[in-house]
Image: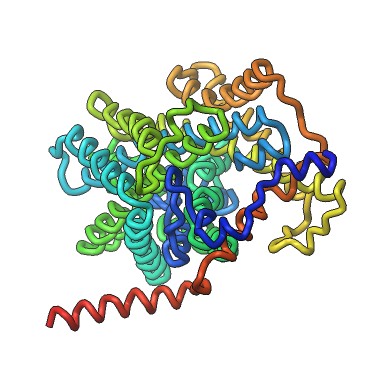
């Protein structure tokens, strides 16, 4: 790309814009109202839901504890190919939108721990209505709601960690290859998070500071929540536990409910009566919070695609509070899939959705690897020193290439058992391979329709929207607040309210 071409692509902002506050937000678009405190909890808790607490029991049963333990959209368009950007956006939207009925189904599953006569349709309708109310409000109220819901998740994980170290039960066997593969497949569903932080960047009050701080927590979040969670499950419950086996095979009453959670089973083995009820109550808030996050992310993803001309133009409309209401409506239509429980068991619907989400997550990771490899090549071609960037990854681009090869292999072999004699099941085949087949269809379909080309490494725009972000943050009158400063401020508000009430 020539210098003149690059200058045409970069949006500049003059001093009058900064002084008038036009850079801060567009009244017809999204609003920057999400603070550091809310982003940090969004990053920690947004991706923690059903898979980490309930579905993980199936991976423990199939793989054993050792097998279980070891077991990006704009950039894709601007750094690789416009067609890849569309394919990434389409896949990620479907992934997020399908996650909503998955979490609603899980709500019914958890409620089944207490009663099995709760109307399934009523619970589905109540969850959809609650998600609509929370997400139709201004983004600051969404961020506040997600802050408190995610706080409950952190509390739940802390309790389960304490329970693990108190019990220290024996572990199970090593499992077989297909068991290890099953654990990796579940990992595609459970281990997510960095992409959620990037989704909220457009509405972060100080994106350059707060988003960077949130990304710094990625490694310890993965270690503490996902790897630590897998380790805890392997410690508290053997993979051949009779009760777990009965639940997985569907021969015990309560199979497909929260009773099948390895934590609940371990507590039952120790004759602990009260703690499982507390765990399931917190689990209920965790699942609801995860569904809330998926509604937010899917809505914003569809909105961004509409802005780029990859979705119908009417989806770009926002109300005065910055809520893309048409995108929200389309996203909530996917939540109606949760009503499949009315004619099928909750566990069966969960299995279908888990397969769809795991394959969608696999495609997301593949696109992230391709995008990063392209970014690395562009930086090298244009003489950009990665050490001058806010963050510089280790062993790159080799680790990205290793991950890409492994992910492609998993994409082909993850459902091989379906092709074994006597094992073919249409629902399993379709749910495991639909998203994987759709990815190349959307990519090559876009290329054929719009004749897009792969961008050369020396033509990639590595500056992009940086001038706009710099100008916006320069226009803010207050200095950025740290996470602990915002928490102290919030606690001070509570104390003031208590004093006023007295």
Residue 214: x and y in percent read 54, 62
Residue extending furthest toward the front: 16
Q: Quadrant of the C terminus?
A: bottom left
Q: Is 23 above or below relative to 404?
A: below
Taking depth in this image into account, of 217 and 167 the one nearest to the observer is 217
Residue 225: x and y in percent read 48, 60
Q: Is residue 501 left or right of residue 282?
A: left
Residue at the image position 60 percent from the left and 52 percent from the top: 70
Residue at the image position 81 percent from the left and 45 percent from the top: 378
Q: Is residue 35 left or right of residue 420?
A: left
Q: Is residue 130 left or right of residue 322?
A: left
Q: Quadrant of the N terminus?
A: top right
Q: Is residue 117 left or right of residue 371?
A: left
Residue 359: x and y in percent read 54, 33
Give the total of numbered labels.
0
Residue at the image position 51 percent from the left and 27 percent from the top: 311
Residue at the image position 17 percent from the left and 48 percent from the top: 114
């Amino acid at each position: 790309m020539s210098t003149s071409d690059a200058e045409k692509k970069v949006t500049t902002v003059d001093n009058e814009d900064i002084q008038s506050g036009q850079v801060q937000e567009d009244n017809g678009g999204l609003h920057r109202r999400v603070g550091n405190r809310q982003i940090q909890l969004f990053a920690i808790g947004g991706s923690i839901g059903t898979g980490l607490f309930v579905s993980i029991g199936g991976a423990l049963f199939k793989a054993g504890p050792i097998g279980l333990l070891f077991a990006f959209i704009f950039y894709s368009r601007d750094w690789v190919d416009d067609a890849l950007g569309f394919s990434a956006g389409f896949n990620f939207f479907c992934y997020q939108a399908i996650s909503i009925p998955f979490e609603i189904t899980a709500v019914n599953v958890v409620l089944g721990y207490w009663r099995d006569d709760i109307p399934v349709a009523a619970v589905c309708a109540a969850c959809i209505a609650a998600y609509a109310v929370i997400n139709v409000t201004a983004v600051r109220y969404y961020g506040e709601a997600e802050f408190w819901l995610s706080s409950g998740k952190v509390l739940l994980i802390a309790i389960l960690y304490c329970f693990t170290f108190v019990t220290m039960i024996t572990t199970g066997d090593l499992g077989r290859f297909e068991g290890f593969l099953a654990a990796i497949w579940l990992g595609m569903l459970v281990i997510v998070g960095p992409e959620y932080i990037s989704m909220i960047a457009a509405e972060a009050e100080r994106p350059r500071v707060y988003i960077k701080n949130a990304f710094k927590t990625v490694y310890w979040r993965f270690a503490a929540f996902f790897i630590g969670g897998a380790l805890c499950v392997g410690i508290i419950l053997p993979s051949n536990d009779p009760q777990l086996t009965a639940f997985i095979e569907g021969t015990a009453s309560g199979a497909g409910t929260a009773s099948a959670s390895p934590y609940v089973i371990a507590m039952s083995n120790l004759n602990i009566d009260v703690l499982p009820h507390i765990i399931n109550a917190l689990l209920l808030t965790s699942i609801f919070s995860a569904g809330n996050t998926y509604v937010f992310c899917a809505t914003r993803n569809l909105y961004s695609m509409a802005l780029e001309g990859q979705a119908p133009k009417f989806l770009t409309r926002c109300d005065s509070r910055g809520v893309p209401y048409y995108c929200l409506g389309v996203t909530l239509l996917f939540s109606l899939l949760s009503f499949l429980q009315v004619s099928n068991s909750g566990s069966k619907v969960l299995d279908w959705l888990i397969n769809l989400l795991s394959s969608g997550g696999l495609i997301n990771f593949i696109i992230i690897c391709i995008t990063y490899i392209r970014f690395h090549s562009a930086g090298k071609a244009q003489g950009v020193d990665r050490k001058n960037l806010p963050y510089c990854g280790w062993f790159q681009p080799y680790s990205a290439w290793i991950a890409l090869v492994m992910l492609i292999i998993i994409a082909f072999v993850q459902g091989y058992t379906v092709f074994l004699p006597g094992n073919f099941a249409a629902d399993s085949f379709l749910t495991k391979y639909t998203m994987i087949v759709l990815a190349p269809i959307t990519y090559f379909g876009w290329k054929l329709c719009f004749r897009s080309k792969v961008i050369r490494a020396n033509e990639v725009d590595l500056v992009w929207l940086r001038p706009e972000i710099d100008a916006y943050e320069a226009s803010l009158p207050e200095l950025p607040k740290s996470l602990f400063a915002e928490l102290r401020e919030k606690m001070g508000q509570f104390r003031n309210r208590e004093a006023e009430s007295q």
